[in-house]
Image (cartoon, coloured by chain):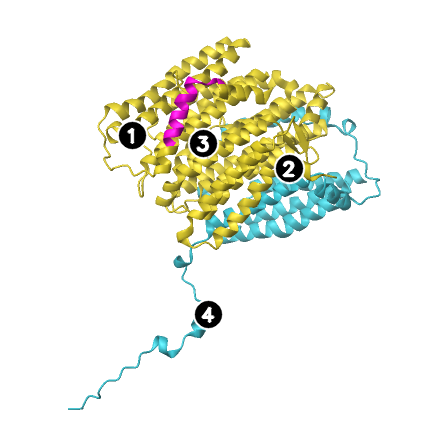
Chain colours: A yellow, B cyan
Amino acid sequence: MNFTVTDLSLMLPEIFVLSMACIILIVDAYLPERLRDLTYQLSQGTLVGAAILTLGIQPESSTLLMSDLFISDAMSVVLKSFVYLIVFAVLLYSRAYLHNHKLFCGEYFVLVLMATLGMMVMISAHHLLTLYLGLELLSLSLYALVAIQRDSSQASEAAMKYFVLGALASGILLYGMSILYGLTGTLELSEIAKAIATGQIEPQLLSFALVFIIAGLAFKLGAVPFHMWLPDVYQGAPTAITLFIGSAPKLAAFAMVMRILSEALPDLHHDWQNMLIILAVLSIALGNIVAIAQTNIKRMLAYSTISHMGFLMLGLLVAKPDGYSAAMFYTIVYALMSMGGFAMLLLLSRAGFDAENLDDLKGLNTRSPWYAFIMMVIMLSMAGIPPFLGFWAKWAVLSQVVAHGFIWLAVLAVIFSVIGAFYYLRIVRLMYFEEPSDTAPLQVNTDMHLAVSVNGLAILALGILPQPLLQVCIQSIS
Amino acid sequence: MIKLIFYLFAGILIFAGTRVITVKNPVHAAMFLVLSFFSSAAIWLLLEAEFLAMTLVLVYVGAVMVLFLFVVMMLDINLTVLREGFARYFPVGALVGSLILIEMLLLVGPNYFGLDKFQVPDTASTVPNTVALGRVLYTEYLYAFEIAAVILLVAMVAAIALTMRSKRQNKYQDPARQVEVSAHDRLKVLKMPAEKAQ
């Protein structure tokens, strides 16, 4: 194998993040407790540096590297940039919470950076092997992060559930990949597509492999009926970790689904389209209905995630570039909204107290009108009410679904969204029309205040002008 | 002859695999797992994949399973708790399991995966397979190999993060400090006026 330095330049973001994670690991080990903030600053610096490298060294066209195991294309640049942005915000939001809950340790930052690296590997994978290894790198870091609060039995239980079910799903995915390898004789995504296009492989066997792959992917996305882990993990994990799990990894999961379904198995789209329809309908229906019955807000947001993943699949199942870019737009928008929602919970928490019940939001308007407004923007956006960003995400997906002839699907999705709007609006009612049960003053740092405000206002501003973001998604897919 | 050996080891493998999940004593289950690793190593050898056979025996039997046995022996696993609800879940589990099994047997059988469908890999090459594996592992699959290394690093970081307690919570002795102690640190000699006996 020969590679030149120019080859490696496109991989610089990955190399940089890995090196910095190792440096932070060593630096943190020798850092006295009072200088621990340096770890935080270094981690944030790493993300900024990676963003500069990713945006600075863009490929002219999609480029394969490292014996075709690695791909750098427009989609990977966009998704990676959003991953950096979201992880940056996650670290910023989590800082005070971690301090208050005695979780502010070097391992947290190293694990988050390693998870970020896993996501980058997945986003840039052009080979089933790298896709799987990236997924494992991400998942292992997440399992450890969920369990990082060792004294909480709830967190340990959540981590255990996540680990066992996650390992099972990885096994199922791997089994599907191995059958695919047995049938096509290659692990490289474009070669698999070529082998299938020859039409010499028994279609029944291909759909056999596809069933396992879809089941594995659906688990990682959290689609019904593979959603059981999601509410428990969201509820059990410390809120700062839930914030992380609920935001950036969804982008990586989207990239994984895209790479496998649209790059390796485009010729099987008749098969996976039907499977995705079932998953999408079940997810949207169950997610929206069960969320109504929840009193724990983290659990409620978990069910809301499930329904949002259903919408994401609606975009994918169109199996056309337009649909993919709508799904990508939806994923990015969802990650931004979910980030804001969990950030508000972090903001209401303090040492010895976790805001996680609906009652904790009661009367937020009298405690802080500004935060109540931001939370209202996020909730209305999640419900898909214009002019907020969430509406445009749903609009983009649904218009694609209708344009490709699945009108009944769009009608069903809208009906369940209307049902789902109930539990988002209930939060707005609690904030504005109830007396506060908790009157402790909110203690918010300036950087947190700024970031939450920017997050909420961005949802509002992008909702009024959604075109640029949508355009970025369309350009990066085509 | 090779076929006979294959069926022998394949039979042992299936038997051992079934026993792993049916046997009651966890230590026995672990031993059956060792047996199944051995027989699959033998099957690798039949395929002339010596390196994989060796790694399976050295890594899995030699290291992983020994560690596993330690853990099983150290934990006092209460089997009655684990078996709770077995009867209740069995019908559903058996139904789903057998359905999946039948569906899989229809596809993964001689119809589609028979010997005539797949060619035996060419083993007549002059390069030993350890060398061949090493060549692709460090060239073609270098990137994947490095990610695997990072995964191991994460596993280490996670294991330490989840198990290491800070020093204050551990009651331990520091021999060096014990030796360094001088009488002045521990004993205080007070001068007192002698009391007179009455």
Q: What is the span of residues highlighted in magenta in the rendered image?
A: A452-467
In the image, A66 versus A157, the foreground residue is A66
Amino acid bearing label 2: Ser
Check the image and name the residue furthest to the left.
B198
Q: Which residue is mark 4?
A: B175
Q: Earlier in the sequence, mark 2 or mark 1?
A: 2
**Residue A9 badge:** 2
- The quarter in which the N terminus of chain A is drawn is top right
Q: Are marks 2 and 4 on the same chain?
A: no
Q: Earlier in the sequence, mark 3 or mark 1?
A: 3
- The quarter in which the C terminus of chain A is drawn is top right
Circle 3 residues within 10 Å: few <14, some 14–19, many ≥20: some
Q: Which residue is mark 1?
A: A361
Please, is residue A272 above or below residue B20 in the view?
above
Of the two numbered discs 2 and 1 in the rendering, the one whose residue sits closer to the viewer: 2
Q: CA distance from mark 3 to mark 1?
A: 20 Å
Q: CA distance from mark 1 to mark 4?
A: 55 Å
Q: Position of residue A266 (x, y in %)?
A: 64, 20
In the image, A31 versus A55, the foreground residue is A55
Q: Position of residue B9 (x, y in %)?
A: 71, 42
Circle 1 residues within 10 Å: few <14, some 14–19, many ≥20: many
Q: Are marks 2 and 3 on the same chain?
A: yes
Q: Which residue is mark 3?
A: A246
Q: Earlier in the sequence, mark 2 or mark 3?
A: 2
Check the image and name the residue furthest to the front.
A56
Q: CA distance from mark 2 to mark 4?
A: 52 Å
